[in-house]
Structures are given as C-alpha cells and as structure tokens.
C-alpha cells in the first residue's frame, strides 16, 4: 500500500539522494531452465544522480514534474504505486519530452507503419550495440552520466558504456527501450502522454485482461506490465518484474506480440498467449500506449 507521503516526496525535485552502490540480484537477469529472462531493474538506486543531471540539463523541469504529479494524484494509490515503483517508467514520465514530445504536433512520421517484426530486428537478433547477446545486465544501468553515449547502457562499476541499446528519447533500455523504439518506428510518433491509455489493471483474470486488450490494445501498442515473477530490490523488498511488449495482434482468443529481453540478453522474439495464459503470466498492468 502506498502512503501519500511517498506518493509526493518521490516526485519532488528537491528529493535528491546520493547514488548508493548497486545491489545486484541474481534473479534480476537470470536465465531460467526454459531460457526465459526479462528486463533487469537493478539500477533503481542510481536514478537520483541521473535525475539531477536531467534537471540540470532541462530535460526535467518544474512544469514536467507538475504534470507528472498531477497525473499521479489522479490515480488511486495502487495504480500510482505501479508507476512510482517502476523506476525506468517513472523517470521517462517526468521528462518534458513525455508531456510535450517533439513530434506532438507534426502528425505521423513518413516512416511509420513498417511491418512488424521490423526488418532490422528479426526474431533471433539482439537489441544490442554490437548485435550480440549482452553480458552486462546484472550491473548496467539506463541512467547514463554526461560524457557517455546516450545510445547505450552504462556500467557504473567500470565507468564505461555497456552493450544494451538505449532508446535515448525516452531514456529506456532492454525490453522497454526496444518497445519504445518499435513503437516509434511503427506508429511514427514517440511514446508519450499524447498516446497513453492511462489505464491500469490490478486484478488480472482471463476476462479482465481480455476486456483490457479489446478496449486499449492494437497492433503497435506498447504494453507495460508486471510479470508474475519477483526479484529482491536494493532495499531488500520483493518486487514484481516489469516487462514491455509491442502488440502485433489482438484476436478473439488472445494476443500476439514482439519483444526484446524475454528469452535472454536483449534477445528479440515474438510470442502469443491466450487470455488464460496472460492471466497467469501477468500480475498487473501498468499502462499502455496506443496510437
Ligand atoms: Zn542488453
Ligand atoms: Zn547493458
């Protein structure tokens, strides 16, 4: 349960904390016996330093924080917690580009409506800098200090860029960076408040997820949720693992999708699940973005 103090303190510009050492959790990027892995969330503790940098560079402003706070305040506590506990999403939503995207008024870009999967990322490829499987997931971060490539993840312990591709516009990597990149390529606009569905789902059943998909998802949607898988965060708390996918189809029986980093090391894959399978796969829905 989220208390209101956390709800507002966590979004205040003044809440600047020191960057603590990473607490690497073995489960955050483990590859199971079935070969499945997922987005890591080990970098929560270093957001604050990066957030200060985004404030100093004007990427986060009092206005964008106010817009973010207004949105969070409009949610019930459980829904707000889904956003605030998802550090990568939380930060991308505090950026001015989320509320006022560069292409907000320019319509759909000429390159939009490419076919999915994208030709440059076929199934079996990697959403990585060198095109090979990443080995940095247990210690890399999507928060990149100045002086380092914004197109790649960053490895704080070594002070070097890592191998995960980073979608710089939204400051996202791995599953979310890939979904953001595919979203832009397919829809021709950035993932932003302009295309946010702003609907959570905290009780996922075959029926509720079917209704959610029919109401809010279509080909090209960025769908963000928590898996029914947990890891231990830097504070020792059990957290559900966030994941992002791009919807490729919604049928009478379920969905099909395109994703990275569910399979291993920024690995690109496709899949499909029935409503019942989704109900067991997904713990709760954080949001969706649909053009
Ligand atoms: Zn990677
Ligand atoms: Zn990495």
Image (cartoon, rainbow, N blue to C red):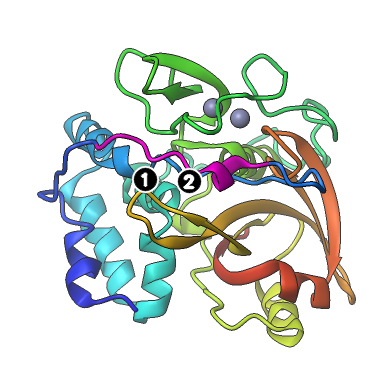
Magenta region, residue range: 20-30
- Residue positioned 22% across, 67% down in the render: 6
Q: Which mark is residue 41?
A: 2
In the image, taking residue 280 as reference, residue 96 lies left or right, namely left
Dot 1 falls on a residue whose secondary structure is helix
In the image, taking residue 246 as reference, residue 28 lies left or right, namely left
Q: Does mark 1 have its CB less than 8 Å from ligand 2?
A: no
Queried whether the magenta region covers residue 217, the answer comes back as: no
Neighbor class of circle 2 (other Cα within 10 Å; few <14, some 14-19, many 20+) is many
Assign ligand 1 to one image quadrant: top right
Q: Please tell me whether the stretch drawn in magenta is mainly helix, strand or loop.
A: loop
On the image, the x and y values in percent for residue 120 come to 78, 25
Q: Which mark is residue 235?
A: none
Q: Quadrant of residue 288?
A: bottom right
Dot 2 falls on a residue whose secondary structure is loop
- Residue positioned 35% across, 61% down in the render: 84
Outermost residue to the left: 14
On the image, the x and y values in percent for residue 234 come to 36, 48
Neighbor class of circle 1 (other Cα within 10 Å; few <14, some 14-19, many 20+) is many
- For disc 1, the marked residue is 44
Judge whether 15 appears above or below 148 on screen: below
Tag 2–tag 1 contact (CB < 8 Å): yes
């Amino acid at each position: 349960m989220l208390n209101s103090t956390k709800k507002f303190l966590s979004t205040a510009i003044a809440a600047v904390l020191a960057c603590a050492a990473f607490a690497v959790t073995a489960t955050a990027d483990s590859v199971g016996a079935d070969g499945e892995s997922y987005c890591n969330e080990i970098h929560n503790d270093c957001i604050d330093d990066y957030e200060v940098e985004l404030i100093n560079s004007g990427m986060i402003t009092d206005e964008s924080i106010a817009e973010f706070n207004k949105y969070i305040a409009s949610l019930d506590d459980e829904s707000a917690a889904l956003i605030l506990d998802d550090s990568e999403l939380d930060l991308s939503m505090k950026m001015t580009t989320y509320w006022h995207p560069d292409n907000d008024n320019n319509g759909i870009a000429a390159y939009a409506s490419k076919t999915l999967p994208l030709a440059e990322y076929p199934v079996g490829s990697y959403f990585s800098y060198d095109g090979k499987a990443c080995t940095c997931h247990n210690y890399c971060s999507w928060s990149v200090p100045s002086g380092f490539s914004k197109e790649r993840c960053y490895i704080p312990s070594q002070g070097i860029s890592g191998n995960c591709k980073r979608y710089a516009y939204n400051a996202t990597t791995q599953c979310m960076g890939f979904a953001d990149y595919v979203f832009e390529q397919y829809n021709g606009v950035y993932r932003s408040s302009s295309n946010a569905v702003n609907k959570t789902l905290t009780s996922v059943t075959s029926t509720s997820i079917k209704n959610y998909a029919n109401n809010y998802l279509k080909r090209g949607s960025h769908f963000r949720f928590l898996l029914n898988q947990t890891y231990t965060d830097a504070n020792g708390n059990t957290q559900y693992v966030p994941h992002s996918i791009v919807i490729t189809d919604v049928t009478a029986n379920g969905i099909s999708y395109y994703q990275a980093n569910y399979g291993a090391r920024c690995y690109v894959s496709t899949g499909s699940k029935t409503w019942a399978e989704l109900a067991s796969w997904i713990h709760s829905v954080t949001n969706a973005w649909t053009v």
